[in-house]
């Protein structure tokens, strides 16, 4: 089973999402973060499930449409470690 590791930028993205949503609905903010964490848990068992992306990364789609998020991550098979690099709203344009 792969180990999930959040790097600082990924964790900061999750905090930003929570803070933004909590301004209007703290309960929804907490539920959204739980949904993101629950979705990322699948990477422990299937780390290559996400679609291939740039720079040896993969993307896991979480939710859908305007309420969905994309987790950008990198899997290192040598160490069996998944690095969570970014979490962004699916409304955002991909960063370069």
Image (spheres, rainbow, N blue to C red):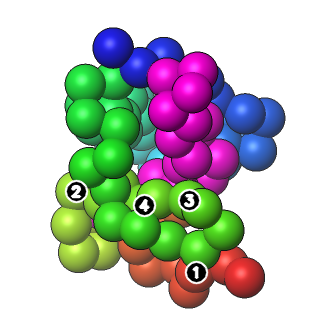
- The label shown at residue 63 is 2
Q: Is residue 47 visible?
A: yes
Task: State how far apart marks 2 and 3 are (Cα).
Answer: 20 Å
Q: Secondary structure at mark 2?
A: loop
Instruction: In the rendered view, tell whether residue 81 sits above or below residue 62.
Output: above
Q: Which residue is mark 1?
A: 94
- The label shown at residue 79 is none
Task: State how far apart marks 1 and 3 are (Cα).
Answer: 13 Å
82 and 87: which is toward the camera: 82
Residue extent of the magenta highlight: 68-87
Q: Which residue is mark 3?
A: 57
Q: Is residue 23 visible?
A: no
Residue drawn 57% across and 47% down? 74
Give whichever of discs 4 and 1 has the lower sequence position. Answer: 4
Q: Position of residue 27 (x, y in %)?
A: 34, 31
Give whichever of discs 1 and 2 has the lower sequence position. Answer: 2
What kind of secondary structure does the magenta stretch mostly adopt?
Answer: strand
Give whichever of discs 1 and 3 has the lower sequence position. Answer: 3
Q: Which residue is mark 4?
A: 59
Residue drawn 66% across and 68% down? 55
Badge nearest the viewer, 4 or 1 = 4
Q: Decide if residue 64 is on the left or right side of residue 32.
A: left
Q: Secondary structure at mark 3?
A: loop
Whether residue 82 appears in magenta in the rendering, the answer is yes
Give whichever of discs 2 and 3 has the lower sequence position. Answer: 3
Q: Position of residue 8 (x, y in %)?
A: 78, 35
């Amino acid at each position: 089973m792969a180990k999930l590791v959040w790097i600082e930028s990924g964790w900061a993205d999750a905090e930003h999402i929570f803070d933004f949503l909590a301004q209007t609905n703290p309960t929804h903010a907490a539920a959204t973060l739980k949904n993101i964490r629950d979705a990322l848990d699948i990477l422990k068992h299937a780390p290559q499930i996400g679609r291939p992306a740039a720079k040896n990364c993969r993307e896991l789609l979480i939710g859908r449409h305007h309420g969905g998020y994309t987790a950008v991550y990198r899997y290192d098979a040598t160490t069996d470690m998944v690095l969570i690099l970014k979490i962004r709203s699916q409304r955002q344009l991909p960063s370069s």
